[in-house]
Amino acid sequence: MSATDSENAQNSGRIPVGISGRVPSEWVADLRRNQWPGWVGIRIKDLETWKGKYDAAFLTGDYDEFLFYGMRFSTALPIVACGAFHPEFDFKGKNLQIITRGESEFEHLCFNLTVVGGKSMAVLGWTGGRQGPAEQFIDSFKALPKDTMANAAFHIACEHLENTYFRPSWWEAQTISAKEYLMRRFRSGTGPSEDTERRSDCLSRLEYSFATATVELELNP
């Protein structure tokens, strides 16, 4: 997978947001025509709030409240992904925040897993209080053995993001059970049933190892 392929994958996100921080009106209108449930409106509000904060930081050049952590792996992983999510459980199974449908604003993380110069890079960015849910998630990630972080990054994408792409040849080479496992990870957190509810051990008990690359460089360790 080349850097160009990775960039093309990242630029085809499912929910487009403009520089104004507003989700395009035609997209919202489509949701309303199809009578999507009320939680979609909450998620749109989340997107607009996040985008507004990032736009303000970009336009003013003030990044003091934006924190990040990243790494470069020793080789290219068979996956690219980007998006944002609310961290619920860390890599030890600790509950970080309980996501409800109220008006509360929950902490989130932005995640980008891409390929640059033939090697994968993972970067997580966040705003929020010191030792809040986002930073606690990062701390638990940092504490992992370096030779397991590529697999952990792989699982972050599958567990939390839908804007995720596998190398086709890699996917076709996987067993049926491995594919079913990955599909369950993509459904995690999408509903209250046993098959879709996010489990506390979603990141602390990884049943498969899909990436074995080592960390050769840390960013902002």
Image (cartoon, rainbow, N blue to C red):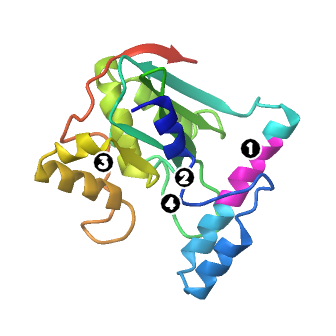
Residue beneath disc 1 = 54
> Marks 1 and 4, Cα distance to the nearest angstrom?
22 Å
> Does dot 2 land on a helix, a strand or a loop?
loop
Magenta: predominant secondary structure element? helix
The residue lying at 53 percent from left, 59 percent from top is 14
Residue 81 lies, in percent from the top left, at 46, 43
Query: Which image quarter holds the N terminus?
Result: top left
Give the distance between the C-alpha atoms of the residues marked 3 and 4, in whole angstroms: 16 Å
Inspect this view and state whether residue 91 appears.
no
Dot in front, 1 or 2: 2
Instruction: Determine if the magenta segment contains residue 137.
Output: no
Task: Decide which of 218, 92 is in the foreground and name it.
Answer: 218
For the residue labelled by badge 1, is the local secondary structure a helix, a strand or a loop? helix
State the extent of the magenta-drawn residues as a range.
47-56
Residue 54 among those drawn in magenta: yes
Residue underneath mark 2: 12
Residue beneath label 4, please? 99
Distance between the alpha carbons at the discs numbered 1 and 3? 29 Å
Question: How many residues crowd around disc 3 within 10 Å: few (fewer than 14), some, or many (20 or more)?
Answer: many
Image check: 66 left or right of 147?
Answer: right
- Numbered disc 4: secondary structure: loop
Image position of 155 (left or right of 127): left
Q: Which amino acid, mark 4?
A: Ile
Identify the residue at image location x=54%, y=34%.
124
Q: Which circle, 1 or 3, is nearer the viewer?
A: 1
- Disc 2 residue crowd, few under 14, some 14–19, many 20+, Cα 10 Å: few
Residue assigned mark 3 = 202
